[in-house]
Image (spheres, helix red, strand yellow):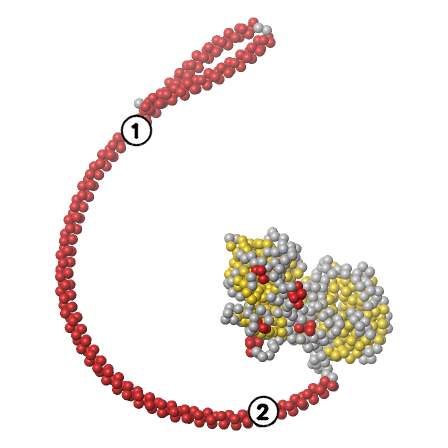
Amino acid sequence: MTTVVAQSHFIFGLRTGVTNNLCFFDEQTVVFPCGNNVVCYNTVQRCQRFIPGSEKSKDMRALAISANRRYLAVSERGEKATITVFDLQHEQGRKRKVVTAGDIPVGEFVCMAFSPDSKYLIGQSGDPEWTLILWLWEKQKVLATVKTSNSNNPVTQVSFNPHNNMQLCVSGTGVFKLFRYTEGALKQSSFPKVESISFLCHTWMTAERVVAGTDTGRLLVFESGDLRREINTSYKALHEQPDRQIGTRMIKDPDTDKASTASRITAILSYSKGFVCSVGLGTVCLFEKTEEDSYRRSREIKIPPDPHSDEVTTAERQEVDTMCISPAEETLAISTDQGQLYSISLSSVDISKEEQPHFEFLSQSFHCKSITGLSVCLWKPLAATSSLDRSVRIWNYETKVLELYKGFQEEAHSVALHPSGLFILVGFSDKLRLMNLVIDDIRTFKEFNVRGCRECAFSNGGHMFAAVNGNIIHIYSVTSFENILTLKGHNGKIRGVKWSLDDWRLVSCGMDGAVYEWNTQTGKRESESVLKSCGYTGVAFSSDCATILAVGTDLTLKEIQDCQVLREVPGDEIAQTAVAVSHSGRVIFTGTSSGTIRAIKYPLPIQKDWIMYQAHCGPVSKMEITSDDQFLLTASDDGCLLIWKIIDKEGRGLKSNRQIIITEEILVTKSDLEEKTQNMLELKMHLEEMQMENEYQLRLKDMSYNERLKEISDKFTQQIQSLQNTQQAMRTEMEKQDCEHQQSSEELTLTHSKELEDLETSYSQKLIVEHTRFQDLQAKCERMQDDFEKQLKSAEDHRVQALEELTQSYEAKLQEKTQLLAQCQEDAQQQIREFKEMIKQVEEDEDKMIHNIQIKYEKQLRTEKETNTNLKGESSIMVQKVKDFDFYFESEQFILIFRLVCFSFRSTVCRGRLKTRAQT
């Protein structure tokens, strides 16, 4: 295996079509899907951690984060849908559990949710079953399942009651159901009639209240599963219109004409002050709880227009897909249907009451459609991308920021950065444009009549560039802008061109199955390799430019030299769409149609020998390696740009023999510079005027404040004098009241002393009487105690005497009974011996009598046999044989009957004698 590996470093983009595709891990870290990875992005440190998807996954469908923000559930579509739960606190999220639907055939889970205690997980399967499954996920155990909908009514969201682990809510098109887990099953607890309403989202406000948003812009409030009222979403609701109380008969949505123009509520989220929801395109509203236990619209936050795009309304017309709030409720973040991430500080929204608050990009502006071109330069750590979203972006892969961004009226099909990083080629449907990268813009300064340019590339020296028009390659001079050469030979669309290190050769490949090597000085073909059964999609020179590497639709990586295919590496039934070779020549990277990246050792191995990485969720369209061999950049049809670090197995970067000089110079036009200088002068003059004006205003304020200070001082001096006079009057009054109080206190003391003496005399007499009474009662108590002690002693003596008498009486009876019992036992033993002897004698007598009877009858039998034998002699031979046989049969039967009779008689006699002796 190769010693060079790729490590995912940073990714630009967002994967749309994933339910709940944005959530907070902590105050600084957000989690979102991008490519075939889940990315944990720290917005402060600007670093990312990657959790790759599974290799056999067909698609990522939903995310869910637990209430304690420790576990992340990722739903992936496949032949058997899976949900993988990752521990975000574990390094790289490697600690995980995989849950499935068991024996239930499920192809995908469209939405999921964790319970408040993070122990349970619910997943809603998709079409056609629409089965809701409840797991105890740590044990990978299915607890209950229930069918929630049908194919005509898709479910859009499921959630747990945040105050009850056992209660769930399911909403969708014509679906709003509450379920409770009890007795091992999910049972529906509410049955509102909502068949005509399409719910897009919902959120729990309390243990009983749920607010749900519809596709017609309505906010409906449910209490215990029953529809109670509708929240007015307009600004007039603040002062004019209260929430409407509605019943079942009013639950239908407005007319179709009105509904078509209404704002869809696609996301809703509760927080401590109320809830946040999307209200139409590019707009998020805050609703605060009122004293009347209702909600009013307080603030509106908008997505700002894009200053770099010619289409001003594009950014503002984005629809919000997902919203999330940080754990401390400091930051609100959203994702949109155009693959953008925005955020805003909620504290700043509260402060700026007068200004219209706007979202800001959470990190950068991303491509929202397929990336068609990718290029890097030599002098700067920059990468350029073009996309079908009609934009060109310049990224810095070291600082991980978007340096420049320009939107156009038409799609950009290709892009190429000049080695200096100061110019850029962009191919459009009508023309090829050469542009300057100025400090804050991308400006066109030359156009070339090359229509539908799908591939373009600057030479390594930067003095020429190649542009592809269908099956023709044009070579232009960068200095004179003349068409130096026109290379013809391909019969199909050209899909790739690469310059050699010395710029003397150019290699091209096309869908016609041809790989051509051109001499850029003469325009002649130096070598060719044609394979009609393969349409080539990517080509590159080896590091020493001795061989050509190409990939195509025949699922192999080919190494070509002198018109011959030297080696082929099969692609394991997956088409390889792009190829890039490191400048050191140690490794080759290829991108596949499934979005994976492969690192293949060079020279190419004979067998399948590569390292595969999960990267994108669409075919890899372009790949580039930086000039210092430190980074690999990959772009895909999913609109994501992924930056990889190229390292060895010890984690060290590759050493490059090339001396790379990084420049910081930028282009600026003279008019821009003069305009900025003029603006600076004007601003400087304006600043001086403002300083003078501020100084004058400060002097005026000082004079005003001094006058006001004097007035306040005089006013407070008068108040102090008045208060001192009041204080003296109050002191005199207080002394007078003290004298009166002292006099009244002395009088009260005398009165209380007299009353105390009277009470002491009275209570002394009562105490003497009570003491005498106590002594009498004490003497009576002593006499009674003596009497009772005597009675107790007498009773004890009687009890002891009676007990002794009873003991003697029962001991005599016990001895008598013991003797009687011994006598009875002895008699019983004697009788048992007699009975055994009697039985033995009876058996001997019976055996003897049976023996005699048997002898008697045997003698008779012999006599009869002799008589019969004589009679047989007188008969014929045949008759004699028959009679012998019959007689023999009858004799044997007679003996058997006789023995049975003897046995029966013996048994009867024995039973009779035993019965008689037993009676006696």
Res 360 quadrant in image: bottom right
> Could you say whether the residue bearing mark 2 is in a helix, strand or loop?
helix
Depicted 702 relative to depicted 612: above or below: below
Q: Is residue 372 at least partly visible in the picture?
A: yes
Badge 1 is on which residue?
828
In the picture, the quarter occupied by the N terminus is: bottom right
How many residues crowd around disc 1 within 10 Å: few (fewer than 14), some, or many (20 or more)?
few
Tell me the distance, in whole angstroms, between the alpha carbons under discs 2 and 1.
137 Å
Depicted 574 relative to depicted 694: above or below: above
Badge 2 is on which residue?
694
Q: Earlier in the sequence, mark 2 or mark 1?
A: 2
Q: Residue 23 location in percent, x, y? A: 59, 67
Q: Residue 49 location in percent, x, y? A: 61, 68
Left or right: where 367 falls relative to 852: right
At a point 32% along the width and 27% down the height, the residue shown is: 832
Res 473 quadrant in image: bottom right
In the image, farthest residue toward the top: 874
**Which label sits in the foreground, 2 or 1?**
2
